[in-house]
Amino acid sequence: MQLKPSTEKALDGWAGPTTWHTDHTLDMERFYRFVDQYHRDHGFTIDEAGLRDLIETKTKSKGNDALCDIIFERVSLAYKILDFLKATGR
């Protein structure tokens, strides 16, 4: 999956810290900033499998079922956020 540079930077801002997978407020804020930037650069659709693979690679979590489950949940949440934005005309 190819992201625009600004989206890649936002993804690195979220997935870079070792705490990326927690529900800590700061980690979730970084995740929401990534989703916001993704929306600005790529619109409302996500190649979910491609994004999951990219996040797994960046976080070095391939083979770690617990982290892969979190990635699956976050990508699903991103998709739901984009659906909300689309439905509300934002």
Image (cartoon, helix red, strand yellow):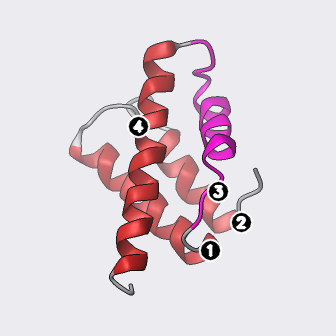
Q: Which numbered disc flags the more N-terminal residue, 4 or 2?
A: 2
- Image marks 1 and 2: residues in contact by CB distance under 8 Å: yes
Q: Give the dominant element type of the magenta stretch: helix, strand or loop.
A: helix
Queried whether the magenta region covers residue 11, the answer comes back as no
Left of 74 or right of it: where is 61? right
- Disc marking residue 8: 3
Q: Please tell me which residue is depicted at 60% across the width and 58% down the height of the picture.
A: 46
Estimate the spatial distance between the alpha carbons at disc 3 and disc 1, rounded to whole Å: 10 Å
Label 2 neighbourhood size at 10 Å, few (<14), some (14-19), many (20+)? few
Ranked by sequence position, the earlier of labels 3 and 1 is: 3
Q: Quadrant of residue 63?
A: top right
Going from the N terminus, do you reach mark 3 or mark 4 first?
3
How would you rate the neighbour count of disc 3 (Cα within 10 Å): few for under 14, some for 14-19, many for 20 or more? Answer: some
| SS category of the residue bearing label 2 | loop
Discs 4, 2 touching: Cβ within 8 Å? no
Does 41 sit left or right of 78 as displayed?
right
Q: Which residue is mark 1?
A: 41
Q: What amino acid type is highlighted by mark number 4?
A: Glu
* Percent coordinates x, y for residue 85 in the rendering: 38, 75
Q: Which mark is residue 73?
A: 4
Residue 70, label in figure? none
Question: What's the amino acid at mark 2?
Answer: Lys
> Reading the chain from its start, which is encountered first: label 4 or label 1?
1
Residue 12 drawn above or below residue 3:
above
Foreground disc of the pair 4, 2? 4
The circle drawn on residue 4 is 2
- Work out how far the residue at label 3 is from the one at label 2, CA to CA, in angstroms: 6 Å
